[in-house]
Image (spheres, rainbow, N blue to C red):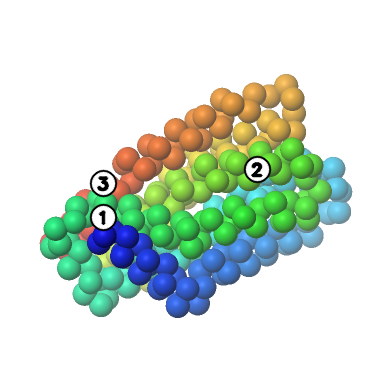
Amino acid sequence: MNNLFALFLRELRLAVRVGGGAWMGVLFFLCVVVVVPFGIGPDLNLLARIGPAILWIGALLASLLGLDRLFQADRDDGSLDLLLMGDTPLELVVFTKCLAHWVSSGLPLVVSAPVLAMFLNMEPTATAALTATLLAGTPALTLIGGIGAALTVSLRRGGLLLAILVLPLAIPTLIFGVSASNAALDVSLPFGTPFAILCALTLISTVIGPFAAATALRFSSD
């Protein structure tokens, strides 16, 4: 556990040192929220209706930033080989790195979502529901992205391929995240069902993601 905690702190320090992944993700999130209203017009009612979808799409795209460096830097400096040969199970190492990436990149998106929701004229109830769905769903995006990062770790400039691999797998999380957020706008729609499925997707990703990524890393080292 001490090794995993040290690895977690190391990943957080590296995330800040390489240019502030948190700020970059939030700025990209802000760009998406600001640009979309220019394309659809200044209709406040329309913005309020499609606000959850805009914010979820922005969070999905912003979560892809920096994923290509999740294992690439370790491979370049040789520390990935040490992690592969270490006594700590590789699955726990992968989970720790994904957790650190979510704390440094995904959690700031969740924190900034209520502020950005104000730009889209969203009601407080809808904003609270959106924040809850992002908090429950963004870890799944990071863990799914970890699988793509492990598959493309041996490729130079594999960021585009990573996005192509991750986006189809992230669609269920996007669908149920938006569905749960929209349920807060329409009392006739149930909030609990899509939110429970969203939480289940995150739990499934927590179980499958580290094992799949660890297998891909072992395969790339052969």
| Label 3 or label 2, whichever comes before in sequence order | 2
Pointer 3 with pointer 1, Cβ within 8 A = no
Residue displayed at 68% across by 24% down? 189
**Residue nearest the viewer, comparing 117 with 5:** 5
In the image, residue 192 lies at what x, y percent?
Answer: 59, 26
Residue count near mark 1 (Cα–Cα under 10 Å), binned few <14, some 14–19, many ≥20: few
Residue lying furthest front: 2
State whether residue 80 appears in this view. yes
Q: Amino acid at mark 3?
A: Phe
List x then y, in percent, for residue 208. Answer: 31, 41
The kind of secondary structure element at disc 3 is helix
Q: Secondary structure at mark 1?
A: loop
In the picture of the structure, the residue carrying the numbered disc 2 is 130
* Cβ atoms under marks 3 and 2 closer than 8 Å: no
Residue drawn at the location 20% of the way across and 64% of the way down:
83
Q: Quick check: 105 left or right of 42?
A: left
Horizontal and vertical percent position of residue 94: 30, 55
Q: Nearer the viewer, residue 164 or 145?
A: 145
